[in-house]
Image: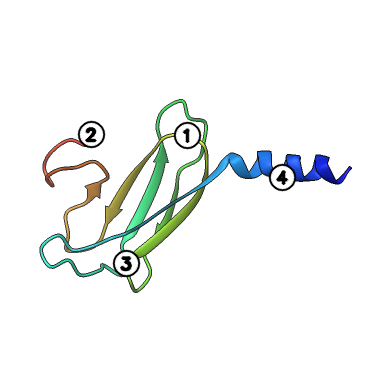
Amino acid sequence: MDRFWIAALCCIAAHAAVINGVVLDSSTGRPLARALVARRPVEGAGSKAASTRANRSGQFSFTVSGGMYLLRASRAGFAPFQYGHKEWKSASR
């Protein structure tokens, strides 16, 4: 019976993931505390959008189920940025 529970827990854990990162000022490399980081699933992924604030070190983290997500960071005084941008005015890849 114990083997069943271990296998079940492994299967549940395999479907969860963590997205984490750091929001930095691109010109100085300094962390941007309190930046708003929004997570949005790609169409058809069936997950919900969520957002969080970066901590004092600019770090953020999301626990997610499997799928594809778009991440967007914004903070007052800075242009918004979406993961995959090469320049602030270009499209994401």
Q: Which residue is mark 3?
A: 58
Q: Residue at coordinates 40% horizontally, 41% vertically from top-left?
A: 40
Residue 29 locus on image (x, y percent): 17, 66
Residue 82 shown left or right of residue 37 in the figure: left
Cα gap from disc 4 to disc 3, whole angstroms: 32 Å
Q: Secondary structure at mark 1?
A: loop
Residue 1, located in which quarter of the rendered image? top right
Element carrying mark 3: loop
Q: Which residue is mark 2?
A: 93
Q: Earlier in the sequence, mark 1 or mark 2?
A: 1
Mark 4 to mark 2: distance in Å?
Answer: 35 Å
> Which label's residue is closer to the chain start, 4 or 3?
4
Which comes sooner in the sequence, label 2 or label 3? 3
Label 4: which residue?
9
> Of helix, strand and loop, which one carries label 2?
loop
Q: Tell me the distance, in whole angstroms, between the alpha carbons under discs 1 and 2.
A: 17 Å
Say if mark 2 contacts mark 3, CB within 8 Å. Answer: no
Q: Nearer the viewer, residue 74 or 71?
A: 71
Q: Which mark is residue 67?
A: 1
The colour mode here is: rainbow
Label 2: few (<14), some (14–19) or many (≥20) C-alpha neighbours in 10 Å: few
Mark 1: amino acid: Gly
